[in-house]
Image: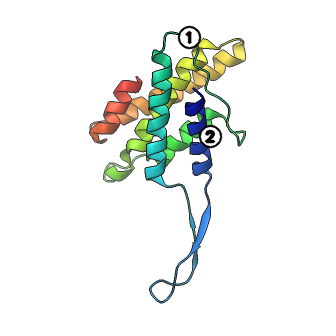
């Protein structure tokens, strides 16, 4: 569980990465460019987090899966939603002629993480506000699953949508 939470903190740090590089002359224009998160790194980190939390859930002694808080103060849900959007998921409007924006493995991984988070959140409802937050999260999750189950989405992402649902 500690490893999974550490992976989520690393994912959050990667999502906030804003490295600047200068394109070297004479081959490039010499301008400074800002790099954002590295998608292959996010894909690998999120898959490792899924495997960690799934393994924890299967242990007989782990009745309640507590996903820890982020070091940046952002909620884990916000991190999962940002992953889904960054992965080209359907929380944004997808154009039919642009299948690259129809979702990739990062968006598939994000809805699997959302599903694990929602299961943990259901176990820890204490107030009416917690229940209302959970309902809002479920609505976002369901719309993501429905959108990523579209036949135009790559099969690996549809598989993630099926596993998450």
Query: How are the residues colored?
Result: rainbow
- Mark 1 Cα within 10 Å, few/some/many (few <14, many 20+)? few
Residue 32 vertical position relative to residue 113 in the rendered view, above or below = below
Q: Position of residue 60 (x, y in %)?
A: 49, 10
Quadrant into which the C terminus falls: top left
Image disc number at residue 27: none
- Mark 2 Cα within 10 Å, few/some/many (few <14, many 20+)? some
Residue 75 vertical position relative to residue 139 in the rendered view, above or below = below
Q: Which residue is mark 2?
A: 9
The answer to whether one can see residue 138 in this image is no
Q: Residue at x 64, y 15 (%)?
A: 131
Marks counted in the figure total 2
- Pointers 2 and 1 in contact (CB under 8 A)? no
Tell me the quarter of the picture where residue 2 sits: top right
Q: Position of residue 21 (x, y in %)?
A: 58, 72
Q: Residue at x 31, y 53 (%)?
A: 97
Q: Which residue is mark 1?
A: 63
Residue 110 vertical position relative to residue 136 in the rendered view, above or below = below
Q: Residue at x 44, y 45 (%)?
A: 43
Looking at this view, name the residue that lies furthest to the bottom. 26
Q: Mark 1 falls on what kind of element?
A: loop
Q: Is residue 157 left or right of residue 81?
A: left
Q: Position of residue 84 (x, y in %)?
A: 49, 41
Tell me the quarter of the picture where residue 150 sits: top left
Instruction: Judge by depth and name the residue closer to the eye, 123 or 53.
Output: 53
Residue 59 vertical position relative to residue 35 in the rendered view, above or below = above
C-alpha gap between disc 2 and disc 1: 23 Å
Dot 2 or dot 1: first in sequence order is 2
Q: Residue at x 38, y 45 (%)?
A: 104
């Amino acid at each position: 569980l500690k490893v999974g939470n550490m992976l989520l903190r690393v994912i959050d740090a990667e999502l906030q990465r804003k490295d600047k590089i200068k394109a070297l002359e004479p081959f490039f224009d010499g301008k400074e460019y800002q790099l954002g998160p590295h998608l292959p790194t996010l894909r690998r980190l999120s898959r490792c987090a899924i495997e960690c939390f799934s393994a924890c859930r299967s242990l007989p002694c782990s009745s309640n899966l507590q996903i820890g808080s982020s070091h940046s103060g952002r909620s884990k849900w916000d991190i999962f939603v940002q992953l889904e959007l960054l992965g080209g998921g359907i929380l944004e409007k997808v154009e039919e002629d642009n299948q690259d924006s129809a979702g990739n493995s990062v968006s598939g991984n994000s809805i699997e993480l959302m599903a694990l988070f929602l299961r943990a959140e259901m176990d820890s409802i204490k107030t009416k506000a917690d229940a209302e937050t959970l309902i809002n999260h479920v609505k976002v999750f369901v719309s993501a699953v429905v959108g990523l189950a579209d036949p135009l989405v790559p099969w690996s992402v549809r598989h993630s949508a099926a596993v998450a649902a």
